[in-house]
Image (cartoon, helix red, strand yellow):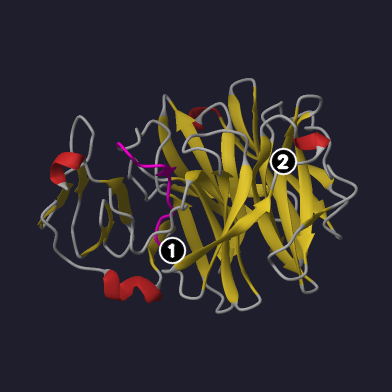
Amino acid sequence: MKRFKYHFEPKFGWMNDPNGLVYFNGKYHAFFQHNPKEPKWGPMYWGHAVSEDLIHWTELPIALSPDMPYENSGGCFSGSAVVKDGKLYLFYTSVSEEDGQTQSVAISEDGYTFTKYSGNPVIKHFPVDGSEDFRDPKVSLIDGKYYMATGSGKNDIGKVLLYTSENLFDWEYIGVLYEHEDFGKVFECPDFFKLGDNYVLMFSKMIEDINKTQFVIGDFDGCKFYPKSLSAPEFGPQFYAPQTFLDDNGRRILIGWFYDWGRKLDEGVDFAGALTIAREVSVVDGQIRMFPVVEAHHLLTTEDELVEVTENKVILKGVDLPTPLCYEGKVDSVHILRDEKALEVFVNHGEASYSYWITKEKL
């Protein structure tokens, strides 16, 4: 099986969620959930890759290893990155037999070597609104304050819980940022950010083994979130756990996990998982749109043998599903990024997108 040309995948082992996406010291950094020992999920490490153009990535030594007592069961789960006073802070879920899922931090001055905070975990227990499913801290600077959104759930209702801090070490629980009983029992990989005049909450949900990413657009008063509209523009079967960040040009950029939990390895392949192409996020008419960053525009085409386009429909073939993926509605434009063994298709400049791996029969 050929390797991707324009999507990052590890040299060896398993990868899933992108973590700690950040622009720091002149480079784009992508950390990721990683099992460096074999190409399947196992004790989690943080892998690390850097890029200067969001297209070509260089894999670096592992950034975080589960070497502390508070990480002795499961390892270092997903999290995020924040730059403060010239230092890079990595926030992650530490998992131990004794305390379960807690939140911890590691600090770096150069972006390559990290020291875990001596006071870890910085959040030692889930709040009363949450449960033992308490993970994926996403820290963002919003309106001059640091907020941490964490995924959780309770009584079969998925939740995003919100904390705030002035120094990134001492965190105060604010309350439930958002909850919804129709979107699954536990929300994963939340992201809360400001985009123009809008406040956007993003989280991943698993309902009956279907992975989806939900966006909620609303208002925020510093404590309470007031939802106004829902948006879920990505329909691909190989897309989950995306994360966003701001780059030095002020773009809100999103990268997701380009794979799925049930995918079987091809014979002789000793690596699994990839990252989607970097996408710029915008809000148009109250809906989220995602379209490849300008650095990737030269890779886009408007035709592919696996993409059938009519005036009111886009049918995507070559995907291992009972029925083809299909967009129905007025079609103004279709842009396609094909990379060896997968497709990312964007309809109407990101009104809808489809990320999927091509079946062997179609390669």
Q: Residue at x 63, y 49 (%)?
A: 46
N-terminal label among 2 and 1: 2
Residue to which mark 1 is pinned = 278
Residue 99: give x, y in percent of width and height.
80, 28
Q: Give the residue displayed 74% in from the left and 54% down from the top.
A: 147
Give, as a single range, the part of the protein colored magenta. 267-284
Residue plotted at (28% across, 70% down): 299
Q: Could you tell me if the residues under marks 2 and 1 are in contact, i.e. CB atoms within 8 Å?
A: no
Q: Residue furthest front?
A: 268
Residue type for callout 1: Ala
- Location of residue 220 in the rendering, given as x and y in whole percent from the top left corner: 66, 55
Identify the residue position indicated by label 2 in the image.
66
Q: Is residue 254 magenta?
A: no
Secondary element at tag 1: loop
Q: CA distance from mark 2 to mark 1?
A: 28 Å
Q: Is residue 320 above or below residue 143?
A: above
In the image, 67 versus 303, the foreground residue is 67
Quadrant in the rendering for residue 135: top right
Residue type, mark 2 in image? Pro
Tell me the SS state at disc 2.
loop
Looking at the image, can residue 149 be seen? yes
Crowding around mark 1 (Cα neighbors within 10 Å: few <14, some 14 to 19, many 20+) is: many
- Magenta residue check for 281: yes
